[in-house]
């Protein structure tokens, strides 16, 4: 485009097809256009990209976007090109001739936006090239990667402070969807943003329903969840290991789902192929490790499922944030059991990180465990972790929709703690539960544990109830798990409880069969008589996407098709009133969609 001198409002309307900015977007954009630096924390789907894309069109010169996502740059650039923006990327996937052509366009100011990975940007040749260009701004996306305590640490990000030294008069904006207070401080320090404006959008994603279920038969639980609530819809399933990713994808495929694996052990070609199918086809489920997802722009991911415990609240928030980017209802569903906590703690202790980092990781895991065992609003707890207060129960998480019963568990907790102590603090959950219920085997008799005062004192509770109590004692910090062999040990905080100086309320064991109320629908249902036109619009979008070799959402989001369905425009000019249809897209696709609507009127 090599844009004319737009105002920000003109660029929003003409290029992106929206009439109003959301939240703090207008303030952020005005600040950057005026030459100011900025730190922007905004949830996934909140519109971070516009905060640098519109200033790139308003300010003279080219915007350099630093992104860690080589695998997704092509799709991001394709989406901008569909809008008529002169965008390109420089990375290792280009052949020599294409690289030379883009560098030539860069120097001649023929481009509005160029995406570059941090490793390439920091090469002396690239820095020398950029010195010869008219630069509008630097945007540092996924800025949490700068923090050594963050969940996606990239060492190269820490060298980006040189941009402040070598390009002192060029505005820099750091953007991320998730960063707790220590991570924010480190972003400011490492990127020399002490004078930057800070823009903290609410972390709340009200369209996402948060739910946690107890681990049982994980694969069957996952299938039941998808069948019941998200049949035929796109989703992401996160697993801890590569092996579990492949097993889960294979199991879902054999059960009739379109499910693909994604992890770092696959070849680059296979990863790219599976990612492309997920982005470009309807209803694909991707089973992945955390290697997948950062920067994914697919708006219609209807669920994110964790069949293993995430490492931290930051990772959980980032990963669940890939659901419902279009604002329509979505689900963040997680399975959790004590085994997850044991495995995660073992990974921390057996890792090669220095003790200071292990201490931080233990704290993050403790916060994650406490979230899983909540009896109060999950959304309020999640937002509180990021320093944001949520004044009342949200009404859209499992603990709000189906409030868990709580009970005075002081007596039972003291039994469990006493049993752990008297058996030597070296046995796992199963052994302690059997001991409390009097189910002694030969080993217990050989050790004399069947004669202890705690032997058989808990026969009034089922084994499942005792496991729930132990799991919550671990999550609340009264019991810790020895890492080498998984033995339960008393933690410092248990002393007052054992002495009877503290009352402990625990949540009653979850009933997996209890019905779950679904999220409030923010979009009207598609009526039966409208289904033929709805399917026709989706089919046309898919056909155009295949012709352009882009994901369908790059043509139009579902929300835009819904608006067409409701408005039934009669000519191309009326499409200007449909959110998400800018001038370039009206010109390129407008008549085709008007014809499809006319055929079904």
Image (cartoon, helix red, strand yellow):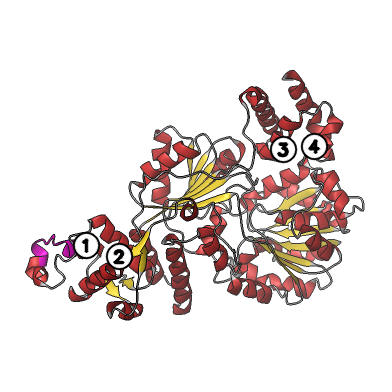
Image: 559 above or below 237: above
Give the Cα distance between marks 2 and 4. Answer: 58 Å
CB under 8 Å between callouts 4 and 3?
Answer: no
Give the Cα distance between marks 2 and 1. Answer: 9 Å
Residue 459 in percent (x, y) is at 17, 60
Q: Is residue 441 magenta?
A: yes
Q: Considering only order in the chain, which callout, 3 or 2, is on the residue closer to the N terminus?
A: 2
Q: Which mark is residue 58?
A: none
Answer yes or no: is residue 2 visible.
Answer: no
Circle 3 sits on which residue?
Answer: 560
Residue at 33 percent of width and 59 percent of height: 339
Q: Label 4: state its secondary structure.
A: helix
The label nearer to you, 2 versus 3, is 2
Residue at 57 percent of width and 38 percent of height: 277
Give the Cα distance between marks 1 and 3. Answer: 55 Å
Q: Quadrant of residue 199?
A: bottom right
Circle 2 sits on which residue?
Answer: 470
| Crowd band around label 1 with a 10 angstrom C-alpha radius: few (<14), some (14–19), many (20+) | many
Residue 397 in percent (x, y) is at 51, 53
Residue at 67 percent of width and 50 percent of height: 73
Q: Which mark is residue 433?
A: 1
Q: Considering only order in the chain, which callout, 1 or 2, is on the residue closer to the N terminus?
A: 1
Q: Considering only order in the chain, which callout, 3 or 4, is on the residue closer to the N terminus?
A: 3
Give the Cα distance between marks 4 and 3. Answer: 12 Å
Going by the image, does 484 lie left or right of 548? left
Q: Considering only order in the chain, which callout, 4 or 2, is on the residue closer to the N terminus?
A: 2
Residue 372 in percent (x, y) is at 43, 60
- Magenta segment's dominant SS is helix
Q: Label 1: state its secondary structure.
A: helix
Q: Which residues are magenta?
A: 433-444
The label nearer to you, 4 versus 3, is 3
């Amino acid at each position: 485009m090599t844009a004319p001198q737009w105002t920000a409002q003109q660029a929003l309307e003409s290029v992106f097809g929206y009439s109003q900015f959301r939240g703090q977007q207008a303030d952020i954009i005005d600040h950057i256009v005026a030459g100011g630096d900025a730190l922007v924390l905004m949830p996934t789907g909140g519109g971070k990209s516009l905060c640098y894309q519109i200033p790139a069109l308003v300010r003279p010169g080219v915007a350099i976007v630093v992104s860690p996502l080589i695998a997704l740059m092509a799709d991001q650039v394709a989406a901008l090109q569909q809008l008529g923006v002169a965008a390109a990327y420089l990375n290792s996937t280009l052949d020599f001739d294409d690289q030379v052509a883009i560098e030539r366009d860069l120097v001649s100011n023929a481009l509005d936006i160029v995406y570059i990975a941090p490793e390439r940007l920091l090469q002396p040749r690239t820095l020398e090239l950029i010195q010869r260009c008219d630069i509008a701004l630097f945007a540092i996306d996924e800025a949490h990667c700068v923090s050594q305590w963050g969940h996606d640490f990239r060492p190269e990000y820490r060298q980006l402070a040189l941009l402040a030294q070598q390009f002192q008069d060029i505005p820099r904006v750091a953007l991320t969807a998730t960063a707790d207070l220590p991570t924010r401080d480190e972003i400011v320090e490492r990127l020399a943003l002490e004078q930057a404006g800070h823009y903290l959008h609410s972390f709340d994603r009200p369209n996402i329903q948060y739910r946690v279920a107890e681990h049982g038969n994980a694969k069957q639980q996952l299938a039941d969840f998808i069948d019941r609530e998200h049949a035929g819809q796109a989703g992401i399933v996160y697993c801890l290991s590569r092996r579990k990713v492949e097993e889960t994808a294979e199991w879902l495929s054999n059960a009739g789902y379109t499910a693909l694996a994604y992890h770092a052990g696959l070849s680059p070609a296979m990863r790219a192929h599976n990612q492309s199918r997920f982005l470009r086809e309807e209803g694909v489920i991707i089973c992945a490790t955390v290697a997948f997802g950062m920067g994914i722009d697919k708006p219609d991911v209807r669920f994110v499922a964790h069949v293993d415990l995430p490492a931290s609240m930051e990772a959980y928030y980032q990963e669940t944030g890939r659901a419902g980017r279009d604002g329509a209802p979505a689900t963040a569903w997680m399975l959790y059991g004590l085994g997850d906590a044991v495995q995660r703690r073992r990974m921390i202790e057996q890792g090669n990180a220095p003790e200071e980092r292990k201490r931080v990781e233990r704290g993050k895991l403790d916060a994650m465990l406490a979230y899983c065992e909540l009896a109060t609003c999950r959304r309020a707890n999640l937002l509180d972790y990021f320093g944001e207060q949520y004044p009342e129960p949200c009404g859209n998480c499992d603990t709000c929709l189906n409030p868990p019963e709580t009970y005075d568990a002081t007596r039972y907790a003291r039994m469990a703690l006493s049993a752990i102590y008297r058996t030597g603090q070296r046995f796992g959950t199963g052994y302690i539960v059997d001991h409390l219920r009097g189910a002694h085997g030969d080993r217990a008799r050989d050790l004399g544990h069947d004669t202890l005062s705690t032997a058989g004192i808990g026969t009034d509770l089922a084994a499942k109830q005792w496991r729930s109590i132990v799991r919550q004692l671990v999550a609340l910090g009264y019991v810790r798990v020895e890492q080498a062999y998984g033995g339960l040990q008393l933690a410092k905080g248990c002393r007052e409880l054992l002495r009877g100086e503290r009352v402990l309320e625990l949540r009653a064991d979850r009933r997996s069969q209890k019905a779950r109320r679904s999220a409030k629908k923010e979009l009207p249902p598609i009526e039966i008589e409208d289904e033929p036109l709805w399917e026709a619009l989706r089919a046309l979008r898919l056909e155009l996407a295949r012709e352009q070799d882009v994901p369908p959402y790059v043509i139009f989001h579902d929300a835009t098709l819904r608006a067409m369905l409701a408005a039934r425009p009669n000519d191309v000019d009326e499409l200007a009133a449909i959110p998400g249809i800018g001038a370039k897209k009206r010109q390129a696709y407008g008549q085709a969609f008007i014809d499809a609507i006319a055929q079904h009127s």
